[in-house]
Image: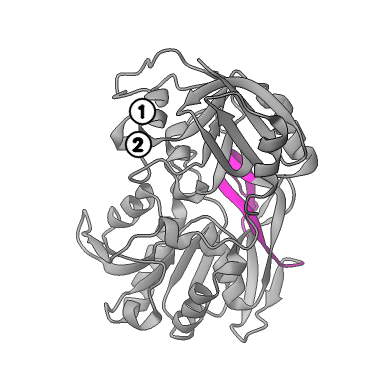
Amino acid sequence: MSRAYLVLEDGSVFEGESFGAAGETLGELVFATGMTGYQETITDPSYAGQIVLQTSPHIGIVGMNKRDEESGQIWVAGYVVKEPSRVSSNWRAESTLDTELRKAGVIGISDIDTRAITLRIRDRGAMRAGIFSGETLDQKIMLEKVKSSAQMSGQFLSDVVSTNQIYRIPPTIAAVGKVAILDLGVKKSTLEHLSNRGLEVIVFPASATAKEILEHKPDGIFYSNGPGDPQASDAQVDVLRELLELGLPFFGICFGNQLLGRALGFSTYKLAFGHRGINQPVMNTESGRVEVTAHNHGFAVQIDGDEAVSPLGFGRVRVSHRGLNDGVVEGLECLDLPAFSVQYHPEAAAGPHDSHYLFDKFLNLIGEKRA
């Protein structure tokens, strides 16, 4: 193996071994806390533009397989692990993590002190970084490249990860309705949850207009997860406002939650280091029940208190969920409209499954509207 370097914009340099493809890559360095689910993580379009560091020390033991992919490719800008598994030991494995990273041209680094890096991000916040390998490199030049790279704030990445054309997925059981999905970086398991509940799924590019969506006469609207800054998605916010005014049932997750917040007239802000992983505790403010949830977000909706009134005339809005680690808004529910959203990932790939009920809630809203 060749030597590799992880360089952070604060000037920190960590030396390790090249993992995956060799070369150089730039992105926002974030950490993910999941002990499992690395395949779902790296194929999640929400991670576009980000170098992902796995806090779990041993990664790759179950290999890779087509069934667990959340999209058609690996999206992470780079990958950081402490100790990659030397073998794949699982009956479902079809390939190894290292092989797939190499095939996808994803540059990584291993044999590095991921705990120290995680603590640095927790202390100083997510920051720009670069992974460099394959040749003798000058630390000053590497740092200059990192500092000249794009900030995540202000980036519009939905057009990078979205579908280029409309496509349909039939329901797997008796049809009960039709849902239009704005693909901002949707995961495969989300589509499966909806089609498995009897919904015909129509997936639209991120650039779709309200008119184009309404031509298909959907019974409900869904905004997916995705990467980037919600403040850079004005067109998608305007479309959502048009659809909310028509009273169509709406469900948004992750990026979709942030865009619902903006459509209602609230602001969003960038978190210091974000929430990423599959073990984040969130409280349902209505029931008091604590859900263990999957996250991937670096931005959040700003609402003070448990309830507010939409500044744009959409009525009352309740904070339906809050993160227990830091009090971040993790869900919104409109009390005068059939619309709600959560900041986390209820499709739960890979786990936990505490929040699957939200898909049933959306289905019930569609049923009530059709009735």
For the record, the magenta segment spans 275-304
Task: Report if residue 288 lies within the magenta region.
Answer: yes
Q: Is residue 120 above or below residue 58?
A: below
Residue of label 2: 68
SS at mark 1? loop
Coordinates of residue 68 in the picture (x, y in percent): 35, 36
Coordinates of residue 92 in the picture (x, y in percent): 30, 24
- At label 1, counting other C-alpha atoms closer than 10 Å, the crowd grade (few under 14, some 14-19, many 20 or more) is many
SS at mark 2? helix
Left or right position of 241 against 39: right
Residue of label 1: 64
Question: Disc 1 vs disc 2: Cβ atoms closer than 8 Å?
Answer: yes
Q: Is residue 271 above or below residue 40?
A: below
Q: Which residue is nearer to you in this view: 242 or 199?
A: 242
- Amino acid type, callout 2: Asp
Coordinates of residue 195 in the picture (x, y in percent): 28, 56
Coordinates of residue 353 in the picture (x, y in percent): 47, 42
Question: Could you tell me which residue is drawn at 29 percent across and 35 percent down?
Answer: 66
